[in-house]
Image (cartoon, rainbow, N blue to C red):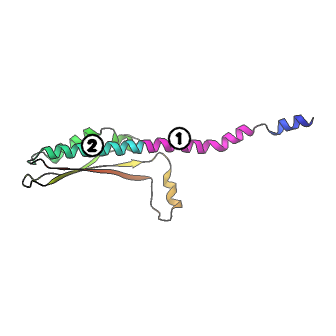
Amino acid sequence: MKRRSVLFSERGATAIEFALILPLLLLLIIGLVDFGRMGFVQVSVTSASREGARLSSLDSTGTGTTATIASYVQTAAPNAAKVSQLDGAGTLTVSVTQCSGSQSSENTSVTASTNFKWLLPVGLLSLVSSSGSTLSNFTISSTGTMRCMN
């Protein structure tokens, strides 16, 4: 009789333990996915800005338009902005400083940036932090700089 009461008192313990661990497990998995997405976007934006700076540096006369270089940068990282916003509506913003063609020791730079939206509710962390800064959306940017080929 005593043995039977011990068995009945442990029924449902596994379900309760699983219910306690499941939110932490989901938080960990979603966090890994988010940081993977963030890494992908950062690498893509960095690569695109370098490619844009390379294209701009090869045009030593500065005759290439900023729109041409910006278009090239956006095609170099076609999915970075889409992945960063989760809804496919993200845009990659490009800023170009071209070579003037008159100086031989001049640099050209291309800055590419996009907004990143977290899948996790990290905006709730702003309630906890003393600075009050929101982490829900932030900008991922990279600047590629190369010497002009005069």
Image x and y of residue 16, in percent: 71, 41
Residue 91 visible to the viewer = no
Q: Residue at image x 93%, y 34%?
A: 1
Sort mark 1 into few (<14), some (14-19) or many (20+) by Cα contacts within 10 Å.
few
Using residue 117 as the reference point, say whether residue 124 is left or right of it: right
Residue range of the region highlighted in magenta in the rendering: 11-36
Circle 2 sits in a helix, a strand or a loop, which is it?
Answer: helix
Q: Amino acid at mark 2?
A: Ala
Q: Residue at image x 36%, y 43%?
A: 41
The residue wearing badge 1 is: 29
Q: How many numbered markers are drawn?
A: 2
Residue at far front of view: 105
The front one of 85 and 142 is 142
Image x and y of residue 46, in percent: 30, 46
The residue wearing badge 2 is: 48
Of labels 2 and 1, earlier in sequence is 1
Image x and y of residue 54, in percent: 19, 44
Image x and y of residue 27, in percent: 55, 45
